[in-house]
Amino acid sequence: MQLLSRLALAVGLILLVVAAVLLGKDVIDINQLHAVANANRSTNFPSPLNNVLITAGLAALGGLITGLGLGLTRARRAPRTPH
C-alpha cells in the first residue's frame, strides 16, 4: 500500500505541474487573442477553449490523485471494539 500511495502522489504532482505549465500557455494564447480582437483584425486565430478545458481537467485529476496519495499515506488505526 505504501508503494501505491507514493505512486499516486507522484503522478498527481506531475499532473498538477503539467496543468500549471498549460495554464501559463493558455494565458499567453488568450492575451494574444485579446490583442488581435482589440486591433480589430480579421486574422484566423484558433480558439483556446479546448486547451483551457484540458488544463482544467488535468488540474482536477491531478488534485484528486494527489489527495488520494496523501490520504493513503496516513497510518491506519485499528477499529475500536466496544467492550
Image: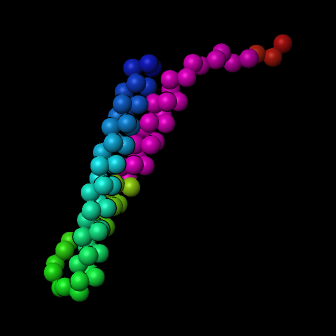
Magenta span main SS: helix
Does the image show residue 51?
no
Does the image show residue 24?
yes
Residue in front for this viewpoint, 19 or 80: 19
Where in the figure is residue 7, as x and y percent of width and height? 36, 27
Q: Residue furthest top?
A: 83
Residue 5 magenta-highlighted: no
Where in the figure is residue 66, as x and y percent of width and height? 44, 36
Q: Residue at x 19, y 74 (%)?
A: 45
Residue in front for this viewpoint, 61 or 47: 47
Vertical placement of residue 83 versus 34, above or below: above
Vertical placement of residue 65 versus 25, above or below: above
Q: Is the N terminus in the top left, top right, bottom left or bottom right quadrant?
A: top left
Q: Which residues are magenta?
A: 57-80
Q: Is residue 15 left or right of residue 78?
A: left
Vertical placement of residue 38 versus 57, above or below: below
Q: Is the C terminus in the top left, top right, bottom left or bottom right quadrant?
A: top right
Where in the figure is residue 55, as x and y percent of width and height? 34, 54
How is the protein colored in the picture?
rainbow
Q: Residue at x 18, y 85 (%)?
A: 42
Q: Residue at x 55, y 23 (%)?
A: 74
